[in-house]
Amino acid sequence: MFKICLIILLLVLSVKPVHADYNQSYSDYQYLYSQYRKSFEDFTVSKATYETYKTLTTQNDALEKMRGVMTDRANIVSAYLNLILEKMQAGDGIPAVQISTYRQIVGTQDSWLSGHQKKIAAAATLSDLDDISADFDTRYPQILNETKKAVGIILVSKNDFVYSKMPDLFSRTESYSQDITNLRSLAVAKTKAQLWEGKRAEIVTLLTPKANSYNDVFDLYKAQQLMIEGLQYLKEASSFLKEIVNNLI
């Protein structure tokens, strides 16, 4: 009985939001998450009290506290799903088909969560809520894997967008100058840019959904650091290109 664990959701924080809608969604998410943590703490106290005294009053209180934390849990998961969608829509270079696919995922999961909340509201006993919570436990890994994959798309998309423009820039720069110094700088720029490919592969591996993974938060942190390192390589490549352009002027 009372099989509820505090869930911790991943979130992309190092990529700065650019849309007011995302800022509002993030603010709403933070509020809902703080509310969820409080209801979990209230539930923990109520559970301990009921298990100590086993009275009808403490049982009813435990029932309502469990109902509350399960409802808040469903709300925060729905908010997180939609927050990631907002982030995808605000990002650079994310293919429309990937946004559309994730939007469909959000719709499907939101529909399931809505039905889940109706069951929570209708539950009459702690045993009923236990069974409903078990349904969530079965569903949650799927939701987590889908959002983790979306987070991976967000993390690599900005650098991919920059990197996709570089082959043409390299080609045009090379055609304008055969000066040995410029060609050396161009070679360095290409090498710097290609280093992003290695970082990208590491990020994709880290954020590929894995069974029985207990390192989600660590994996996300490491992926964010790899993204920053990759962006630095791309900035350095751009710096060498600018140096060549200045030499041509």
Image (cartoon, helix red, strand yellow):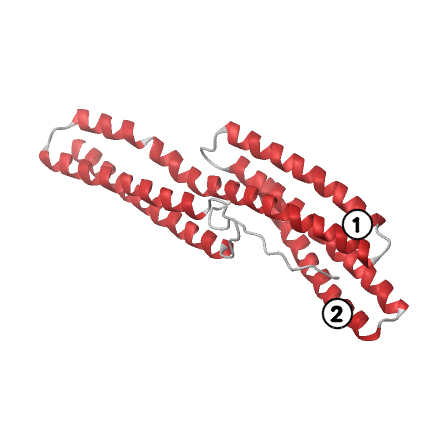
Where residue 203 is drawn, which disc sits there? Answer: none
Distance from Cα at disc 2 to Cα at disc 1: 20 Å
| Residue at the image position 80 percent from the left and 57 percent from the top | 127
| Residue at the image position 41 percent from the left and 45 percent from the top | 205
Helix, strand or loop under label 1 = helix
Please tell me which residue lies in front, 130 or 31. Answer: 130
| Residue at the image position 81 percent from the left and 53 percent from the top | 128
Residue at which label 1 appears: 120
Locate residue 185: give its quadrant. Answer: top left
Q: Amino acid at mark 1?
A: Ile
* Label 2 packing within 10 angstroms: few (<14), some (14-19), many (20+): few
Q: Amino acid at mark 2?
A: Val
Going from N to C along the chain, the mark reached first, 2 or 1, is: 2
- Residue 220: % across, % down: 47, 52
- Residue 191: % across, % down: 23, 40
Residue at which label 2 appears: 45
Image check: 110 left or right of 232?
A: right
Locate residue 169: give its quadrant. Answer: top left
Residue 28 visible (yes or no) = no
- Residue 216: % across, % down: 50, 53
